Amino acid sequence: MNAYYIWIHPYFPILPAPEQIPLPDQPLALAENQSDGFQEPLSAISLAISAILALIPCPLDSNPSSEESIRWRRTYSQFLAKAALESVENESDRPESSVEPSKALDDSDEEITREKFRSPVPLELESIIALDLLSIYEYAQRGNLKKMRARAGAALVAAMSLRLHQRSEVEDEYTEAGRRVWWMTYICVCQGSIVSNTVNIPIPV
């Protein structure tokens, strides 16, 4: 969380403002031969953030510009990005539909029991945030416009299904989080249209 507010939030403020000033970053070096013993984050949002942070050269790396160091950072970053996308899909999956196809038509929300990544951000927004971050990752790191737009499009559909695009007269502790997620999602969709030279249809808000 601290690293997010130092490296990502100033350029992509999709999470609410920090409750306190971030502490100096204290990264840990992870060598390629040590990766087997490292426990990756579990939630989609933490995996997506980690995928971006993994690209930042570690101060403890004696030669961060070397071909081997760059290759390792990019390889591990891509591994985390794939894990984040898989986590998003797992949270929306209904395993029982494999034997009972009618279950796939059930739109009722199942309760997610894991711990929140950030207290003022409801769990149902985390997958959308992860998709937005993965959209930026696909464009800025891999130059994959097709995947960039696919991630942003999926985030937009999910955001609209939660009615984030509709202004609510009732405000609560999650209001700011919802507004940030909606507008950053909209920005990702617009950015995807701009860089791929396609027409973006405005959505009423």
Image: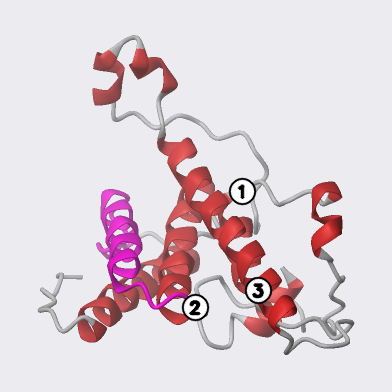
Q: From this view, report whether residue 204 is shown above or below residue 45.
A: below
Horizontally, is 119 left or right of 130 in the view?
Answer: right
The local secondary structure at tag 3 comes to helix
Q: Nearer the viewer, mark 1 or mark 2?
A: 2
**Mark before the other along the chain sequence, 1 or 3:** 1
The residue under label 2 is 141
Whether residue 62 is visible, yes or no, is: yes
Q: Nearer the viewer, mark 3 or mark 2?
A: 3
| Location of residue 50 in the rendering, given as x and y in whole percent from the top left corner | 65, 65
| Location of residue 7 in the rendering, given as x and y in whole percent from the top left corner | 66, 83
Q: Is residue 165 magenta?
A: yes
The residue under label 1 is 43
Label 2 neighbourhood size at 10 Å, few (<14), some (14-19), many (20+)? some
Q: Amino acid at mark 1?
A: Ser
- Front residue of 130/19: it is 130
**Mark before the other along the chain sequence, 3 or 2:** 3
Whether residue 54 is visible, yes or no, is: no
Residues under labels 3 and 2: Cα distance? 13 Å
Q: Is residue 51 magenta?
A: no
Q: From this view, report whether residue 121 is shown above or below residue 105.
A: below
The local secondary structure at tag 1 comes to loop
